[in-house]
Image (cartoon, rainbow, N blue to C red):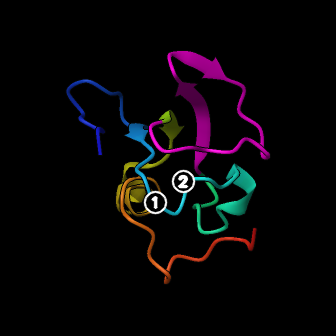
Amino acid sequence: MASDSATNPEGFHRVTVAPGSPADGRTIKELTHLPVDVWVSFVVRDQQLITVRADTTLHAGDHLLILAADKEQPELAAIFEQPDDPRVPVAST
């Protein structure tokens, strides 16, 4: 996860949605395992800023700026940057 304290202020996390991750192909509202105090603030796709809404569908390769406590970093990595794990709950599609 690209959350380097040397380049990002505390609480800012830059992630790229990985192919096959729990976030790939799902809307933000479908990510029911996303911690409550996490805010996906920016989505960049193909060098274009995408408006972030609950119904915004995320795709592999999307670059996100997420605001969250640093303690949430492992959970963010599991949702956005690691292959889908059946133990990570998401809403049915």
Asked which secondary structure carries label 2, the reply is: loop
Left/right placement of residue 75 relative to residue 29 reads left
Residue type beneath disc 2: Asp
Look at the picture and state if 46 lies above or below 38. above
Q: Residue furthest bottom?
A: 87
Residue nearer the viewer, 34 or 23: 23
Q: Which amino acid does label 1 sit on?
A: Ser
Determine the residue positioned at 25% across, 24% down: 7
Pointer 2 local density, CA inside 10 Å: few below 14, some 14–19, many at least 20: many
The vertical placement of 15 against 20, above or below, is above
Q: Please count the marks in the image.
A: 2
The residue at the point 45 percent across, 53 percent down is 80
Q: Position of residue 82 (x, y in %)?
A: 36, 61
Write down the residue under mark 2.
24
Q: Please state the horizontal and vertical placement of residue 47, each as a whole percent of the image.
A: 50, 16
Which residue lies at the image location 24% right of the left edge and 33% below the top edge? 5
Residue 31 % position (x, y): 64, 61
Residue at 40% of width from left, 40% of height from top?
15
- At which x and y percent is residue 53? 77, 38
Quadrant in which the C terminus is drawn: bottom right
Q: Can residue 52 be seen in this view?
A: yes
The part of the image, by quadrant, that contains residue 48 is top right
Segment tinted magenta in the rendering: 38-61
On whether residue 43 falls in the magenta region, the answer is: yes
Looking at the image, residue 39 sits to the left or right of residue 74; the answer is: right
- Mark 1 is surrounded, within 10 Å at the Cα level, by few (under 14), some (14 to 19) or many (20 or more) other residues, namely many
Q: Are marks 2 and 1 in contact (CB under 8 Å)?
A: yes
In three-dimensional space, the C-alpha distance between marks 2 and 1, rounded to whole angstroms, equals 5 Å
The residue that disc 1 covers is 21
Which residue is nearer to you in this view: 89 or 72?
89
Position of 54 compared to 12: left or right?
right
